[in-house]
Image (tube, coloured by chain):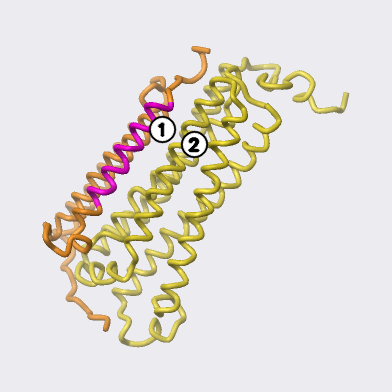
Chain colours: A orange, B yellow
Amino acid sequence: MAELGHVIHPRVFWKVFAVLVFLTIITVILSPRVSGHIVDFGKVNILIALSIATIKASLVLMYFMHLKFEGPWILVYFILPVSLLILMIAGVFIDNPLRIDPSPEVNLS
Amino acid sequence: MAESVYSKVGGRGAPPVYHHIDPINAYHAAKFGMWLFLATEILLFSVLFTAFAIYNWAYFESFQHAATKLDWKLGGLNTLILLFSSCTAAIAVYKAQINDNQGVVKNFTVSFICGLAFLVIKYFEYSAKYRHGYFPGTELWNSAEFSTQYKNYFGLYYVMTGLHALHVLIGMGVLLWVIFLARRERFSEKYYTPVELAALYWHLVDLIWIFLFPLLYLID
């Protein structure tokens, strides 16, 4: 039935799943607390982890959720607002260093 | 005549009859509504993500230190479980599209069991936190040693993962309902709206965890 949703073969889903697992492992390895600070980019760590997470989320949206094959209305009403949202959250990340002085560490024994 | 319209006119694998709207329009309208709902869900979690971004900057060292109190192995295991369950949920939609109701039952059951496994692991994580005293109301939490910074981190941790766990629970309920319908051979290539919408909701749960895991467990 071509009139209903687009049909994606499970073969594609398993490939996407393999890529998602691979990216998860990359995220874990890049985490300084796991690697024992061999790889450590300081405050940029969180942005790297979030960038990989965004790629993973895009894969889930495009293939698992069939978004790649949806009509224009879902794209306009979903992709556009979510893009604006990402822009605003990115704005928070840029705004933070200009407004907030990081408070000193308080140790927990 | 008081009998269900669905059982008479709809029947096995046929779309329910709405009298005023044709099945293809009904399918696309339902899916469009679901996407709007998912957008509001993303908005709900975005508020928490933004709060986390601000506090993570302000209390950077403390948040990094507090994150080491979480078990990244359990968090990672939960990530893999949710990714796998999302994959089977996507396959369930394919099974409905090729008229295989038993395939829907099997794949959604796997997703359901994965959701259950996720919650069990989450329970072990929460109870470990409670035993260590990183929980509101414990002696350590109320002591001066447990600074506002740590309370902020764990507060956000419990709200974000708690709200997410609630979504897992609701998603499991939705899956169970669709499994029940699929067991009655309710779906076909002509009508599988509930299968697709349930799968979309389940993917959203996965989507949120994809961001929660690196943010909460892997910073340091």
Q: Where's residue B126, x and y in %?
A: 45, 68
Judge from the rendering whether residue B107 lies leftward or rightward of residue B48; answer left or right.
right
Badge 2 vs badge 1, beta-carbon distance below 8 Å:
yes
Q: Where's residue B19, x and y in %?
A: 70, 17
Q: Secondary structure at mark 2?
A: helix
Asked if residue A15 lies in the magenta stretch, the reply is yes
**Quarter occupied by the N terminus of chain B:** top right
Asked if residue A32 lies in the magenta stretch, the reply is no
Depth check: give the residue in front, B150 or A21.
A21
Q: Amino acid at mark 2?
A: Ala
Marks 2 and 1, how far apart in space? Answer: 8 Å
Q: Is residue B45 above or below residue B217?
A: above
Subunit ID for the residue under disc 1: A
* Residue on which the image places disc 2: B89
Q: Is residue A19 above or below residue B213?
A: above
Q: Which residues are magenta?
A: A10-27
In the picture, the disc for residue B116 is none
Residue at x 45%, y 46% (from the top left corner):
B205
Residue at x 37%, y 29% (from the top left corner):
A63
* Residue on which the image places disc 1: A64
Q: Quadrant of residue A56?
A: top left
Residue at x 29%, y 56% (from the top left corner):
B215
Q: Amino acid at mark 1?
A: Phe
